[in-house]
Image: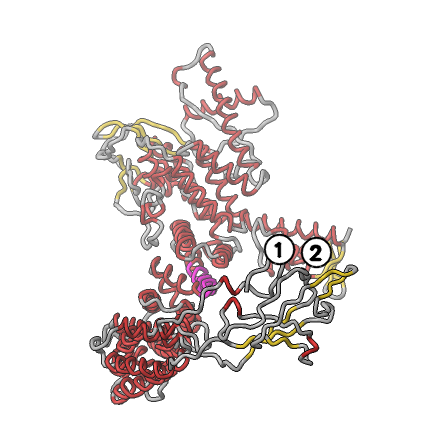
Amino acid sequence: MKNDPGRRSAQSDPTSSPPDRKRKRPDKQAPAQDSSKQQTLHFSNSKRLKPDQPARPSTPPKKLARNEMYTFSSRSPAANGNGVIDLTNGTPPSSPQARRVNGAFKGRSGINPHTGAKKLVVKNLKTNTDWDSKAYLEKIWGQLDAALVVILKDGQDGFSKEDLYRGVENVCRQGGASTLFSRLENRCRQHVERDVREPVLEKSSSDNIAVLKAVLAEWARWKEQMTTIRAIFFFLDRSYLLSSSKPTLAELTPQLFRETVFSHSALKPKIIDGACDLVTADRTQQQKLDPSLFQQAVDMFHELQTYTATFEPRFLGVTQQYVDEWSERMIGEKSVPEYVALAEDFISKEMARCEQFALDASTRRDLLALLEDHLVARKEADLTDYEALASVLDNNAMSDLTALYALLNRRRLGSKLRPAFVKWVDETGTSIVFSKDEDSMIIHLLSLKRRLDLTWRTAFQRDEALGHGLRETFETFMNKTKKGDATWGTDNTKVGEMIAKYVDQLLRGGARAIPEVLTMRRSSSITAPPKAVALPTAAEAEENNEDDDMDEDTEINIQLDQVLDLFRFVHGKAVFEAFYKKDLARRLLMGRSASADAERSMLARLKTECGAGFTQNLEQMFKDVELAREEMQSYKQRLEDRVGFEKGRNVDLSVNILSAAAWPSYPDIPVVIPANIKRSIDDFELHYKSKHSGRKLDWKHALAHCQMKANFGKGSKELVVSSFQAVVLLLFNGMGIDEKVPYAHILSESGLPEAEVKRTLQSLACAKLRPLTKHPKGKDINTTDTFSINTSFEHPKYRVKINQVQLKETKEENKETHIRVAEDRNFECQAAIVRIMKARKTIAHSELVAETIKSTISRGVLALSDIKKNIDRLIEKDYMEREDGNMYAYVA
């Protein structure tokens, strides 16, 4: 019908669409619809109609055209009785024309627009087709099945992939995708069960590796076949399988193989064990691992999605069993350093294998945890055993210590070395402290300390627990005391005395007095323990330093810092103070310090470490030397200005005025002073008393030294000797070459005690430098010996030092110092007890002992028995009294 601009239709204009055209391709044709079905459309009568709309033709043609398909009857809805307008009726009704009457629509035939929606029935006008999709599917499947037979036999000829692909596409478009996939799946499953699994099952009785190889070969063949099949069925995969719950062809490939071949009870264990056997053979070095075969196995496990569920647990289980047996065997057969090296190599190889074959991160993590647990954690007791660690420390095997700590620290067990390490340090240090070789004690302690510090920094990676253990152990064994001949039956620590003597050696000899094992110039001084220490004497060091212009301040300062590290561990600093004070006095009085800067540097270190009270007397000693120098300048100026100065009294006298409180006490030793020396001494005493009234001078001739000229057969020399040596040598003035002086004559003329005479003669006739000759020859001085001038005495230098006897400490002096320090410590202990009692008034015995030790620890620790003796002495002196309950009360 014609379009009316005033009429509205419920659907698009049918005249605007072209007539139906039949599709040429059968796969594009839609399936035939049932012509008996009707479609119902609903229209609303609420739309306005124009009253002048023309009527439709009364008689339709025999076959309706598209533009005449829909007609409306002029009958009212009530005519059919059900309000349905049949558009297929052959007699088209005339279209109603609505008029607006009094504001409402009313058609010519009396149609009321407000009666509700009308029901429109449209019958299907499309004709049925003769196309049979089922027959087409069977035809295409026949072609596909024939091609599958060729493909599954590894063939590539006899079919066209393009034609097969188009056939699959047509079938899918006609709704046969589900049927096509079912047939394909069944066909592939039959192939895998019959042609893939059966040949492998025939080899199941072979070894695991042979079965693994057969399965890998079939898996590679199956993947290649499915690659071709996927290309043919690509449209099925993309258009149907992706949007359905069924597996895609990429998923079907491993699924069929996994369910049919891999999961078979006779094959699955052998496949997994075959891969594990490859690794085990490589571990035991029975057969080198085939990288390609193992990599194919790992890739297959990943592709079949069985890696985590099957291979990984079995691989870890086999590894655990092997590592457990291997570690037990190795720890029993090998030493700890050898076991550590083998364990580290084993772990590195296992991790390298994981990296090489790209095993999962979970496998690497669990494998590493397993290895560390069996190789480290379960062998903790063996790795931290004292005997094992002591052997490594004795050999100073730094690389072995580093490897041992690194292996233990994989499980944060490095600090577990502390008990064995501390025990070794304590035993080694104690053996050094109580060794009979006292002269090299500090050398060994310094070498041990440097070596252990290096071990802690490098091998033990600055482990905090081991560092604390090292310092605490040094403090323990260095303060161990033992009453014996070395300390003259006192509780004094020998370490304090030897530290003071080593510092004296450094300050007298300079850098040349430092043993080679401790010098910074020697690269091996840190790593090599001193087995045989050759110590240069102070005299040799002094002689070498006379012509040595090398800047030695840095070397000496380094050594002083190291000595101070040991000094910090010492509790009994009173022993060090006493011996250091005595040695400092000798160096200052005899001018034997190698460096004044080094002397003051050491004094500053002691002041920083121990406080000003510790160094008060030492500083006063330096001040006395400076004041004495000024006093001598004043005296010499007076001599030069004196009128009538006698030529025979021009002895170059040098005197040191010392304050008795600051300096050590020295005994008065009788000696016959030569007349000219006596006159000079008396003259200086008059000069001093004229300036300082009320002061008394006590002359300590044992500390004096002088320079005298001597003529020998090979030339004249200037000898630096002590005052006692000078008195003895003067007895040989004017004597002939062959004349001999008996021992008794020297004893009577010198006025010295017999012990000093023997000591002096031994230094002149039995030492390295011998201006006198002893008859008969020997090391000991006897009363029957005689002495003469050594006419063959020679020395490359004009000025020769022979007075080393003054610098050597006698046994009597050493005993006196130790006993005095012990007595002073007893007095300090009693003073500490009185202070504590005065503050507490009443206190228990245990508390008093603890407070006393805490108060006196910086000066030295007394034994509990000595503290009890001091308490008893104070009770006898009525400073305190005992009360019930093991209590003490202070007596005001």
Q: Is residue 548 magenta?
A: no
Q: Earlier in the sequence, mark 2 or mark 1?
A: 1
Colouring scheme applied when the structure was drawn: secondary structure
Q: In the rendered structure, are the residues bearing label 2 and label 1 in contact, judged by CB atoms less than 8 Å apart?
A: no
Closer to us: 313 or 629: 313
Q: Residue at x 36, y 69 (%)?
A: 359
Give the main secondary structure, helix, strand or loop, of the magenta stretch. Answer: helix
Closer to us: 59 or 813: 59
Q: Residue at x 53, y 39 (%)?
A: 665
**Disc count in the image?**
2
The boundaries of the magenta stretch are 411-428
Label at residue 830: none
Q: Quadrant of residue 279?
A: bottom left
Q: Secondary structure at mark 2?
A: helix
Q: Residue at x 41, y 79 (%)?
A: 129
Q: Quadrant of residue 885?
A: bottom right
| Label 1 environment density (alpha carbons within 10 Å; few <14, some 14–19, many ≥20) | many
Q: Circle 1 is placed at which residue position?
A: 853
Closer to us: 168 or 442: 168
Q: Residue furthest right?
A: 102
Residue 12 image position (x, y, % from top left): 55, 63
Give the residue type at disc 2: Glu
Q: Circle 2 is placed at which residue position?
A: 876
Residue 782 image position (x, y, % from top left): 33, 47
Q: Residue furthest front?
A: 58
Q: Quadrant of the N terminus?
A: bottom right
Q: Quadrant of residue 351?
A: bottom left
Residue 676 image position (x, y, % from top left): 41, 23
Closer to us: 241 or 579: 241
Can the viewer see residue 457?
A: yes
Give the residue type at disc 1: Ile
